Image (cartoon, grey):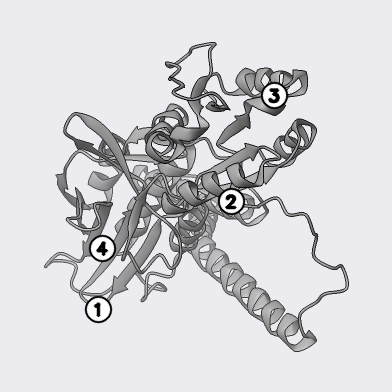
C-alpha cells in the first residue's frame, strides 16, 4: 500500500517507543489474525482435497473414471488453485508498500467483463445472476481494481445461488457504489455454504486487504437469508458542464463523508527558500485537501524524489538550476505527463503547458490566490 510521508527537518528519536504492553497487545492481535487466516485457508482447501482424494481412491480401485467424476476433479483443482492464488495475493498485499499507477478506468466495463468471464462457471454451478449496472468511472490502480472486482464476485457467488450485481453513483457524496447481494433460491433454501456462515472466506480477507491498499470502503452485511457486499469508491469521476471533476475525500475516517474536496490526498513538492511563498502555497494546498512538502534547495528536491516521488513539483524560478532541470528529465522519462509548475517573480505571468508539451506551466507569484487552485487541478489531471 502506498504510504504518504512528509519531509521534516527533524527525525523522530530512535529512543522513542511505545509501552511494552501496547506492543504486546498489537502483536497478539496480529498473531490472532494470522491464525484465523491460516484456518480459513485450511478449511477451504479441505473440501476440494477431499473430493480429489475420493476420486483417486475410486480410480485406484476400479481403474475407471466417469465423466461426472472428471468434472468434479476439474472443479476441485480449480477451487484449490483459486485458494493458492488468493493466498499469494494476500501475502503480497500484506508484505509491504505497493507501487500503484492511478488511471481513469471504466468500472462498469470491468464489472461486466468479470461477470461475462464467469458466466459458464455460474451456469455449471446453477448460480443465477441479475445485473443493474450504470456507467461509473474511477481513478485507481488497474491491477488492484480488477482483483477487487474479481474477489467481490467470488465472495458473493460463494454465499448463494442467486446474485444481484448493481453499480451506480450515490447522490451524496457522489461516489461510485458497487453492491452485490447473494441469496439462496427457493430450491436451495436459506442456508449459507457450509463452513462460512458469516461470509468469512478467503475472498473476504483478500477483499479487505485490497480495499485497504486502494483506499476504498468495503463493508458487508450477512444474515441467514442473504449476504450483501458494499464497495464505495471515493475517487469517482463525474461530468460537470462538460468538464471532468473527481470526487475525493480529504481524508480521515472513511465512514464519515462530511466533506469532499477535488484531488484530495495528492502530494505536492514545493522547492523554495522563501518562507512567505511557502506559507501561501501551503494554505492553498490545505484548502484543496492536498498534502504539501517543502524543501529549500534543488539538491534536496532530487533527494526527496528519490525517496518518495510526489504527484507534482512546484519550483520557485529564482532557485531553478541545472540540478532541477535534470530532475525534470528523470521524472519525465518515467512519467511523460508528470506535472511541473514554475512560480515566476514577475507580475501578470500565466502560461499553461498542454499535454505532452516540453514547456512548463508558469504563474506569477502575485496571482497565486486566484490562479493556483485551477492550475493545480489542471496539472494533476495529467497523471490521473
Disc 3 and disc 4: Cα gap in Å?
62 Å
Label 2 or label 4, whichever lies nearer to me, is 2
Disc 2 and disc 3: Cα gap in Å?
33 Å
Contact between labelled residues 3 and 1, with CB atoms less than 8 Å apart: no
Task: Report crowding for label 2: few under 14, some 14 to 19, many 20 or more residues within 10 A (C-alpha).
Answer: some
Task: Report crowding for label 4: few under 14, some 14 to 19, many 20 or more residues within 10 A (C-alpha).
Answer: many
Q: Residue furthest top?
A: 358
| Coordinates of residue 213 in the picture (x, y in percent) | 52, 53
Q: Is residue 73 left or right of residue 160?
A: right
Label 2 or label 1, whichever lies nearer to me, is 2
Task: Report crowding for label 3: few under 14, some 14 to 19, many 20 or more residues within 10 A (C-alpha).
Answer: some
Contact between labelled residues 4 and 1, with CB atoms less than 8 Å apart: no
| Coordinates of residue 348 in the picture (x, y in percent) | 44, 23
The quarter of the displayed image where residue 353 is located: top left
Disc 1 and disc 3: Cα gap in Å?
65 Å
Q: Is residue 88 above or below residue 240?
A: below
Residue that numbered label 3 is attached to: 320
| Coordinates of residue 231 in the picture (x, y in percent) | 33, 57
Residue that numbered label 1 is attached to: 224
Q: Residue at x 50, y 51 (%)?
A: 283
Mark before the other along the chain sequence, 1 or 4: 4
Return the residue nearer the eye: 34 or 236. Answer: 236
Return the residue nearer the eye: 94 or 115. Answer: 94
Contact between labelled residues 4 and 2, with CB atoms less than 8 Å apart: no
Label 3 or label 4, whichever lies nearer to me, is 3
Mark before the other along the chain sequence, 1 or 3: 1
Q: Is residue 357 left or right of residue 225?
A: right
Residue that numbered label 4 is attached to: 160
Residue that numbered label 2 is attached to: 1
Contact between labelled residues 4 and 3, with CB atoms less than 8 Å apart: no
Label 2 or label 3, whichever lies nearer to me, is 3
Amino acid at each position: 500500500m502506498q504510504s504518504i510521508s512528509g519531509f521534516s527537518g527533524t527525525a523522530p528519536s530512535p529512543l522513542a517507543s511505545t509501552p511494552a504492553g501496547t506492543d504486546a497487545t498489537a502483536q497478539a492481535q496480529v498473531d490472532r489474525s494470522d491464525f484465523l487466516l491460516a484456518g480459513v485457508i485450511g478449511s477451504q482447501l479441505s473440501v476440494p482435497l477431499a473430493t480429489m482424494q475420493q476420486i483417486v481412491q475410486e480410480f485406484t480401485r476400479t481403474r475407471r473414471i466417469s465423466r461426472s467424476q472428471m468434472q468434479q476433479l476439474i472443479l476441485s483443482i480449480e477451487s484449490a488453485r483459486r485458494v493458492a492464488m488468493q493466498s499469494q495475493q494476500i501475502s503480497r498485499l500484506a508484505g509491504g508498500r505497493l507501487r500503484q499507477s492511478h488511471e481513469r478506468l471504466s468500472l462498469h466495463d470491468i464489472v461486466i467483463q468479470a461477470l461475462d468471464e464467469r458466466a459458464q462457471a455460474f451456469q455449471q454451478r446453477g448460480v443465477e445472476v441479475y445485473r443493474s449496472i450504470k456507467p461509473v468511472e474511477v481513478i485507481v490502480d488497474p491491477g488492484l481494481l480488477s482483483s477487487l472486482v474479481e474477489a467481490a464476485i467470488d465472495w458473493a457467488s460463494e454465499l448463494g445461488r442467486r446474485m444481484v450485481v448493481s453499480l451506480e453513483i450515490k447522490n451524496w457524496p457522489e461516489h461510485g457504489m458497487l453492491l452485490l447481494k447473494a441469496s439462496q433460491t427457493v430450491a436451495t433454501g436459506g442456508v449459507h455454504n457450509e463452513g462460512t456462515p458469516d461470509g468469512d472466506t478467503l475472498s473476504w480477507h483478500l477483499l479487505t486487504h485490497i480495499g485497504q491498499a486502494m483506499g476504498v470502503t468495503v463493508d458487508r452485511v450477512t444474515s441467514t437469508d442473504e449476504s450483501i457486499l458494499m464497495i464505495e469508491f471515493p475517487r469517482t469521476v463525474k461530468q460537470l458542464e462538460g468538464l471532468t471533476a473527481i470526487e475525493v475525500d480529504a481524508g480521515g475516517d472513511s465512514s464519515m463523508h462530511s466533506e469532499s474536496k477535488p484531488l484530495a490526498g495528492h502530494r505536492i513538492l514545493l522547492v523554495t527558500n522563501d518562507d512567505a511563498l511557502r506559507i501561501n502555497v501551503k494554505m492553498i494546498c490545505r484548502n484543496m485537501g492536498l498534502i504539501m512538502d517543502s524543501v529549500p534547495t534543488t539538491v534536496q528536491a532530487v533527494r526527496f524524489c528519490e525517496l518518495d516521488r510526489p504527484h507534482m513539483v512546484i519550483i520557485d524560478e529564482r532557485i531553478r538550476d541545472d540540478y532541477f532541470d535534470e530532475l525534470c528529465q528523470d521524472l519525465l522519462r518515467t512519467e511523460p505527463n508528470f506535472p511541473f509548475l514554475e512560480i515566476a517573480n514577475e507580475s501578470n505571468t500565466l502560461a499553461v503547458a498542454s499535454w505532452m508539451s516540453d514547456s512548463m506551466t508558469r504563474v506569477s507569484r502575485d496571482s497565486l490566490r486566484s490562479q493556483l487552485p485551477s492550475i493545480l487541478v489542471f496539472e494533476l489531471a495529467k497523471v490521473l
